[in-house]
Amino acid sequence: MDVQNIKKVIIPVAGLGTRFLPLSLAISKEFLPLVDKPVIQYIVEEAKNSGIEEIVFVISPKQKMILNYFKGSPELEKILIKRKKDKILKELKDFDSTFEGIKFSFAVQKDPLGDGHALLQAYKMGGLGHSESVAVSFGDDIIDSSVPALAQLINIFQTCDAPVIALKQLPREKIPAYGSVVVEKIANNLYKIKKIIEKPQPDQIKSDFVIVGKYVLTPEVFDYLKKSKPSIKGEIILGEVFEEMLNDGKMVYGYEVKGEWLECGDKLKWLKSFMYMSLKDPVFGKDLKDYIKTFK
Ligand code: UTP
């Protein structure tokens, strides 16, 4: 077995973000802040710290913000130099340096036809080698951990050479809103996925695990995506494609990633993630905790 080093991640950010209306009419949810950085920056930093060298964003035709955000700020830099704003200039340079060594490319998803359809647009754009496996990170799931979540998945992928899905445990009553899995334990934190049930009924829930939006996908997953038919809702859903693979007897692994799962896909989850990051922030955390104590 060749050990493949994963150097590329696809980050789909072309969804509608309807759970954030009316805010999502003005900005896409990936640009909501956690303390002083947009969610997407945490996801990019996690990828970089996992050894990723190329990021392929899948964007909607009107998603211009992301193009601007990652292209550096030479004009602002010039103004700051002229005005001798050294401290802010350093902050800006530190920010720009977080993207050094990363190549960004962009695929456009004209219509929001599902997360699987978004991944296909990255594949069709070219640049993904035929025998190349890639990481995928959705634009609204952050894992706060010492070993970055994608690095955890990539390490496991290198030992099992089959698709790997990030998993987290949740209380049973929360699971019906997620992609749930039936699993067989193989080793510490590592599971063989036997079945995937999107948004299960309570009696269909067979484990405490749900799918987090982070994966390592093999070329075979893209072969299945290419031939998949849209669901009744007209979407191509990655979870359904995995289900087809499982029905054909293909191996798919699940790995329980270590770290705090900061979800940013709906208002309450984002508010909780905002609060978590703010309260542990080295600059603002203490003042915020003191402030909360004054609430009646
Ligand atoms: P979500 O399931 O969170 O859907 O997508 P959404 O459309 O973004 O949000 P809601 O449900 O309307 O509130 C998971 C990930 O897949 C991307 C999203 O941007 C997010 O990163 N996605 C989803 C696409 O890129 N294209 C799609 O057609 C659907």
Image: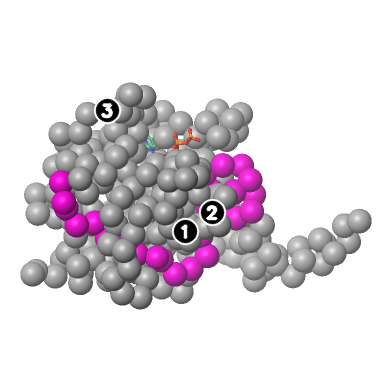
Position in image of residue 131 (x %, y %): 9, 54
Does dot 1 land on a helix, a strand or a loop? Answer: loop
Mark nearer the N terminus (3 vs 1): 1
- Asked if residue 277 lies left or right of residue 114, the reply is right
- Asked if residue 153 lies left or right of residue 224, the reply is right
The quadrant of the picture showing ligand 1 is: top left
Query: Residue most toward the right?
Result: 296
Q: Which mark is residue 172?
A: 2
Q: Is residue 135 visible?
A: no
Span shown in magenta: 248-273
What amino acid is labelled 1 in the image?
A: Asp
Q: Is residue 137 above or below residue 257?
A: above
What amino acid is labelled 2 in the image?
A: Arg
Q: Quadrant of the N terminus?
A: bottom left
Q: In the image, what residue occupies the spot 48% across and 68% down?
A: 259
Reading the image, the residue beneath label 3 is 230
What amino acid is labelled 3 in the image?
A: Pro
Image quarter of residue 212:
bottom left
**Front tag of 2 and 3:** 2
- Asked if residue 282 lies left or right of residue 58, the reply is right
Mark nearer the N terminus (2 vs 3): 2
- Asked if residue 252 lies left or right of residue 268, the reply is left
Which residue is nearer to you in this view: 250 or 93? 250
User: Are discs 2 and 1 less than 8 Å apart at CB?
Assistant: yes
Q: In the image, what residue occupies the spot 35% across and 55% down?
A: 182
Position in image of residue 110 (x %, y %): 31, 26
Reading the image, the residue beneath label 1 is 208
